[in-house]
Structures are given as C-alpha cells and as structure tokens.
Image (cartoon, grey):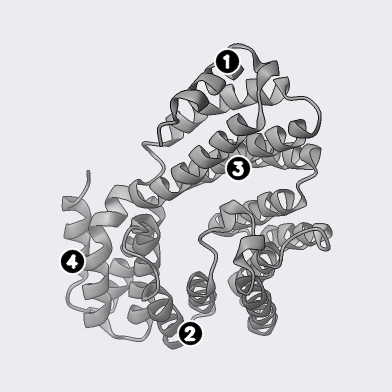
Amino acid sequence: MAPDADLYERITRAIEHPRRVDLATVHWLEHCLAEHRRVEDTIGSRPLLPLVHVQLSTVAELARGARGPLADRAVAILAQYAQFIAWMCQDSRQHASALAWYDRSHAWAIEAGDASLASTTLNMQGHQAWSLGDPHRCVRLAEASCWHDGRTTHGVQGMAAQMAGRGHAQMGQANQARTKLAEAEDLIRTAAEHPEDEPPWMYFYDEGWFLMQRGMAELELGDGRRAADYLERGLSTLPDHYRRDRAWYGACLARAQAIQDDAEAAVATALHVVPDATALNAYAVTELRRTAHDLATAGAPGAQAIKDSLTGSKP
C-alpha cells in the first residue's frame, strides 16, 4: 500500500498545506479505505477502529482544503470514512457512537451530493435497528433510503429492499418479508450485470451474500429448513478470508440446524465457527450461546461442548 516517491511527496504537501490537495491524493485515500475494508473482513474491527479514527482527522483537514470540483470528491471520501467507522463501532457494540457516525456520514454524503452513500447510511442504520430488535425502525429507515431512488444504483436499492424484508421477518410478517426479498433479488441480479457501476463499499454485495440475508430472514420466521438451505448455499460462495462474516453466518446456520432438531449438525457447525466467533464477532458468540441454551433445554447432547468451547476460546 505504500505510495511511490512522487505520490508520497504530494500527500505530505497536502497534509502540511490542505489547500494543495489534488486528485492523486484523493485517489490514494480512496485506495487506503478500500484496503482497510478488506482487511477488516479478516481481522475484525477492534484493531482497525482506532487507526481509521485517527486517519479521519487527516481526511477532514484535506476535505476542508479542497476547492472546486474536487471538494465534492473529498467530502464524499470523508463521508465514506465516517460510514466505515460507524460500521466498526456497531460491530464493536458501541451503538451510540455508531448512530452518531452514521448521522455524520449521512450529512456529509448529502453535502457531497452522493445519493448512493446517503442511502447506504440509512440502510446501515436500519441494520443497526434490526440488530437491536427494533424491526419497525428497521423498515422505516429502509423506506427512507428509497427517497433517494432514481439517483442510486440497483445494488443500493436492493440493499434497502432486503433490509425492509428482514424487518418484516423480525415482526413475523412472512408475506411482506418474502415479497420485499424477492424484489431485492431482482435488483441484485440487475446490479450483477454491471458491477462496475456499484460504489466501492458495495464490494461484498453479491448473490451469495444475499442468499445468507434470506437465510437470516427465514431464521427470524422460524423456518429452519429454508434458513439452513439459504445459509449453506451462501456460505459455500463466501471466501475463507471473510472470517468475521463466516463466523456470523455459521452461527446462524447452527441455530437453523437446531430448529430442525438436527442437534448433531448444529453442534458440529457451532464448534467449527467458535474460534473466529470469539476472536472477531461478538454477535456470533451471542447466537452460539443461544443455540447452546436451546439444545441444552431440549436435552440434546453436545450443548455443553459448545459452552465449554466458547469459554475456552476467549482471546
């Protein structure tokens, strides 16, 4: 990731004199953020959050110094940094901080005229509401995201539709949930025809990822068979370096298998993802503990092994 000598000199001058920021510097910041996103998939948010937080201060100085057409581009990258920090705060269960950073990101996205990012921040706030068990707010935020339709990509619109579907699923509204998810599927397939048109933060959003979103929705609806099918198919497409996500969706799969009374499969799946869950994903740990509790209540063998593994694998 190190810049060449000329670019390094440009960045240094821009930091010392923000009004000298140029397109090459902004390109470099965008490149760094893209690399941070991919590293976070592997090592989780804890090591990166303080680093990116410090970088944001520098990006803010550069954005304030940008002039002319470059100003919108600089403010847009600032909004992307804020959105990434918000996600990492949410992943670290710093919910108040996440909400504040999503709000800040949305405001900067509006200032920069970036409708896709403004829409995405609302979708991610919807995800946060869903994770806190507030499905009504999840749906409302997904609907608010659609106010930007017409100026957003098909992938971003698909994210809003699936978020609304997950909110309806959490409320137990199966018909509404599956209707919105079918709508999202059509949008995602359209987006897949021209992936180059999607914004850089949507790099993870593909049909395999969407299958796992459908699995989560079916899990909320209590259909373990459908949930397991979607999750297994989606996980089969997810590269190994997505350790944090593999831990979460693996934990969801274990729960889906437990709902089907397939205790043996649930225990095997749970034990497989415990190391990454304890190292990288607190939400996955909670899901695994819930599955272990349900298995123990049903008198299924192996529940204690999950509990012991979770305790013994703490970093």
Q: At 69% from the left edge and 64% from the top edge, which residue is drawn? A: 160
Looking at the image, residue 159 lies above or below residue 200:
below
Q: Which residue is mark 3?
A: 83
Mark 4 — residue? 304
Marks 2/3 in contact by CB < 8 Å: the verdict is no
Q: CA distance from mark 2 to mark 1?
A: 58 Å
Which residue type carries mark 4? Gln
Mark 2 to mark 4 CA distance (whole Å):
25 Å
Residue 296 on image: x %, y %: 25, 72
Observer-nearest of 231 and 39: 39
**Real-space CA distance between mark 3 and mark 4, rounded to the nearest whole angstrom:** 39 Å
55 and 177: which is toward the camera: 55
Task: Identify the mark nearer the N-term, 1 or 3.
Answer: 1
At numbered mark 3, what does the secondary structure look like: helix, strand or loop?
Answer: helix
Using the image as rendered, state which of residue 253 and residue 237 is in the foreground: 237
Residue in the image at 60% along x and 27% along y: 59
In the rendered image, the vertical position of residue 284 relative to residue 193, given as above or below: above
Indicate the secondary structure of the residue bearing disc 4: helix
Dot 4 or dot 1, earlier in sequence: 1
Q: Which amino acid type corresponds to the residue marked 2 in the rendered image? A: Asp
Mark 2 sits on what residue?
223
- Residue type at mark 3: give it: Gln
Categorize mark 2 by other alpha carbons within 10 Å: few (<14), some (14-19), many (20+). Answer: some
Residue marked by disc 1: 13
Residue 11: in sight, yes or no?
Answer: yes
Discs 3, 4 touching: Cβ within 8 Å:
no
On screen, residue 46 versus residue 209, left or right, reads left
In whole angstroms, how far apart are the C-alphas of marks 2 and 3?
Answer: 33 Å
